[in-house]
Image: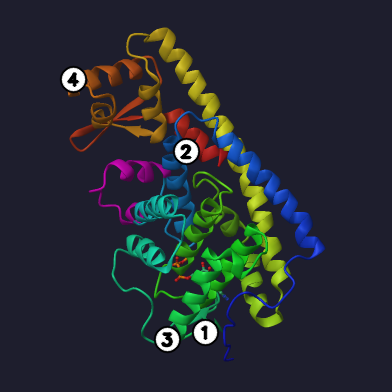
């Protein structure tokens, strides 16, 4: 069935009482998350660790499954041959790049979205110019044909860009808008590939752009994977039944649930950091520094180069430090090719079990 995607804003009441009730809960959890994140001393710890985590979850939606081990290794071993991990790593890079852009520009423009998608897919295809893209269900049946005409895609993306960046265009709450943006972006489906992943990155960047979070740490990918059938249904039902309410409620619930899970995760990371700090301070007081501790938490895999760069010490000193920390049981040493890596197994455990 032919469907002409309407431009935004939706001509429907998006501030129903059901939505309001869920909106309050979502905002409360999000504000708590914003506060909890501030208790971690160095923001890069959460950014680096959680973007990688999200990259894995988000990529899994497309069945690019990779183990945690590959994932963290890939982060420091870019030349690795593991293509799954590489795809995840590209996602993390795209996400971090998007964050830098939004933090600096305070805008999320189409040119930025193009940059992010390019980073994800490692190609220059840009917005679709050839017809033929169709969305199919699990049985291969076409459920939706997005706009095919390049001019229509550009016009709809222009309208979406305005909706994202110009608040005078629509004054509904930012979280409701995030749901609308997500639906519209996925429905325009402007790229040949990576629309899902780019759309999920837009969600988080929008929260940062609107000041609801300082850093990108609320990721809906896991929630979407765990509630996938409902996800596809709510997207489709906006189109077929004009049911915006269910879509908005789905996203708001996702924000609430995910914010609470992320708070728990941050608390666990913080507890672990404190126990590492205590042990380092008492058992290795000569080499302890907050910067050293931070390195072990930015990536569960550490190598001497990280210490050389961040602590400005020689390679030999870095090696001595890492061996000493391994000896007191805080890191585990492993060999990959010719290089040694030091794993923060406690952090891996927290990331695997708690998130
Ligand atoms: N009926 C639908 N209406 C609107 N959008 C849809 C519908 N079905 C799926 N989508 C969106 O299309 C995305 C998939 O598009 P695409 O394959 O280009 O993205 P991807 O990033 O490569 O894959 P994935 O999202 O599976 O990781 C889904 O994640 C979803 O957001």
CB under 8 Å between callouts 4 and 1?
no
Q: Which residue is mark 4?
A: 316
Q: Is residue 314 left or right of residue 123?
A: left
Residues at badges 2 and 1 in contact (C-beta under 8 Å)? Answer: no
Question: Mark 2 — residue?
Answer: 46
Crowding at dot 1, Cα within 10 Å, few <14 / some 14-19 / many 20+, comes out as some
| Closer to the eye: label 1 or 3 | 3
Q: Secondary structure at mark 4?
A: helix
Specify the quadrant that holds the N terminus.
bottom right
Camera-side mark, 3 or 4: 3
Mark 2 against mark 4, which lies toward the viewer?
2
Q: Is residue 80 found inside the magenta-colored segment of the image?
A: yes
Please give the range of residues in magenta.
68-86
Question: What is the x, y in percent for residue 255?
Answer: 63, 52
6 vs 314, nearest the viewer: 6
Mark 4, other Cα within 10 Å: few <14 / some 14–19 / many ≥20: few
Element marked by disc 3: helix
Q: Is residue 232 magenta?
A: no
Residue to which mark 3 is pinned: 151
Q: Residues within 10 Å of mark 3 (few under 14, many from 20)?
A: few
In x, y percent, where is residue 233?
65, 72
Asked if the residue at label 1 sits under 8 Å from ligand 1, the reply is no
Please report the residue visible at 73 percent of the width from the left and 49 percent of the height from the top: 25
Instruction: Name the residue tied to disc 1.
Output: 145
């Amino acid at each position: 069935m032919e469907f002409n995607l309407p431009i935004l804003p939706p001509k429907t009441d998006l501030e129903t009482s059901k939505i309001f009730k869920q909106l309050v809960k979502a905002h409360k959890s999000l504000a708590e998350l914003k506060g909890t994140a501030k208790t971690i001393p160095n923001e890069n710890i959460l950014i680096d660790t959680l973007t990688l985590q999200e990259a894995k979850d988000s990529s899994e939606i497309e069945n690019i499954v990779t183990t945690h081990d590959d994932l963290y290794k890939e982060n420091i071993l870019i030349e690795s041959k593991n293509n799954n991990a590489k795809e995840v790593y590209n996602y993390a890079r795209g996400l971090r790049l998007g964050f830098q852009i939004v933090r600096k520009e305070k805008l999320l423009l189409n040119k930025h979205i193009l940059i992010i998608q390019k980073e994800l897919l490692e190609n220059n295809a840009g917005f679709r110019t050839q017809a033929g893209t169709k969305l199919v269900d699990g049985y291969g049946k076409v459920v939706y044909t997005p706009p095919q005409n390049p001019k229509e895609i550009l016009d709809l993306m222009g309208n979406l860009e305005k909706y994202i960046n110009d608040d005078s265009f629509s004054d509904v709450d930012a979280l409701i808008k995030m749901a609308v943006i997500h639906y519209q972006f996925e429905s325009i489906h402007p790229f040949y590939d990576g629309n899902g992943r780019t759309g999920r990155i837009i969600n988080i960047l929008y929260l940062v752009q609107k000041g609801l979070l300082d850093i990108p740490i609320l990721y809906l990918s896991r929630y979407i994977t765990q509630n996938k059938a409902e996800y596809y249904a709510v997207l489709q039902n906006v189109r077929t039944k004009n049911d915006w309410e269910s879509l908005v409620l789905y996203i708001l619930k996702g924000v609430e649930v995910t914010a609470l899970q992320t708070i728990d995760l941050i608390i666990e990371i913080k507890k672990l950091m404190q126990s590492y700090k205590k042990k380092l301070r008492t058992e290795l007081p000569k080499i302890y520094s907050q910067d050293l501790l931070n390195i072990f938490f930015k990536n569960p895999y550490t190598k001497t180069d990280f210490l050389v760069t961040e602590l400005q010490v020689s390679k030999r000193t870095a090696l001595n430090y890492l061996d000493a920390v391994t000896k007191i049981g805080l890191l585990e040493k492993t060999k990959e090719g010719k290089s040694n890596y030091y794993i923060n197994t406690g952090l891996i455990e927290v990331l695997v079990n708690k998130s």
